[in-house]
């Protein structure tokens, strides 16, 4: 089974790409998120997930610009009733960070806004994936803290961990603090979190 392919991008469309690796062309189905990450690049390393089509026994290779998106794809396809097409549609409609935020904040409306995802599917995704995302499956700690590159959030989280608080509780507290005040300083985040924890 392929884990990743590195090579020249021979073809790139919003739904499909071909990676040329030493004269072999690997055709991969991709999401809009991966397309946007690769647009304009000549070479790339693409992380691969092979999905078996239950109906006819064929397999399809899906490609991802990052491991995190591939892990989210695996998590979504692990939800009962969710196939590869639905997972790709979700990852084409939202960034990995937005999807994780929607699941962690139980934002059913955000998931329902994706074409083909109804109320029950959205609720099932949240129910089955929330704990996995809180535990860090398919997510870097950067994304779990509401602001992806927020140095203040990272610093505050480290300080709170040193004080003995658990990572999931810290993440929940910091998310709600940053939701209310996205520009909070390290001190403000720590003070507010201490009142919540």
Image: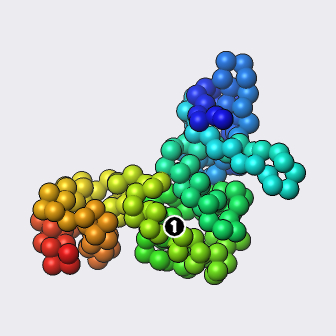
Let me know if residue 177 appears in the view: yes
Quadrant placement of the C terminus: bottom left
Residue drawn at 49 percent across, 49 percent down: 68
Q: Which residue is mark 1?
A: 129
Q: In this image, 195 relative to 140: left or right?
A: left
Let me know if residue 159 appears in the view: no
Residue 119 position within the rendered picture, expressed as x and y whole percent measured from the top left: 63, 81
Scheme of colours in the image: rainbow
Q: In this image, 133 relative to 94: left or right?
A: left
SS of the residue at dot 1?
helix
Number of numbered discs: 1
Residue drawn at 54 percent across, 70 percent down: 128
Q: In this image, 54 relative to 123: left or right?
A: right
Q: Nearer the viewer, residue 190 or 123?
A: 123
Q: Is residue 57 above or below residue 96?
A: above
Q: Is residue 129 above or below residue 96?
A: below
Residue drawn at 58 percent across, 28 percent down: 6
Q: In this image, 133 relative to 175: left or right?
A: right
Q: Nearer the viewer, residue 174 or 93?
A: 174
Residue drawn at 81 percent across, 55 percent down: 54
């Amino acid at each position: 089974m392929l884990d990743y392919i590195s090579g020249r991008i021979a073809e790139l469309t919003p739904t499909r790409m071909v990676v040329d690796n030493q004269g072999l062309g690997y055709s991969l189905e991709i999401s809009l998120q991966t397309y946007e990450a690769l647009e304009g690049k000549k070479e790339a390393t693409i992380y691969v997930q092979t999905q078996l089509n239950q109906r006819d026994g064929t397999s399809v290779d899906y490609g991802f610009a990052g491991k995190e998106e591939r892990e989210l794809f695996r998590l979504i396809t692990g939800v009962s009733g969710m196939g590869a097409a639905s997972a790709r549609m979700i990852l084409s409609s939202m960034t990995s960070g937005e999807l994780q935020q929607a699941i962690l904040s139980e934002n059913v409306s955000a998931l329902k806004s994706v074409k083909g995802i109804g109320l029950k599917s959205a609720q099932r995704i949240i129910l089955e994936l929330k704990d996995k995302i809180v535990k860090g499956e398919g997510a870097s700690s950067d994304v779990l803290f509401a602001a992806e590159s927020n140095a203040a959030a990272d610093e505050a989280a480290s300080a709170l961990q040193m004080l003995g608080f658990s990572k999931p509780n810290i993440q929940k507290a910091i998310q709600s603090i940053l939701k209310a005040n996205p520009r909070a300083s390290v001190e403000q985040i720590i003070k507010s979190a201490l009142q919540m924890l």
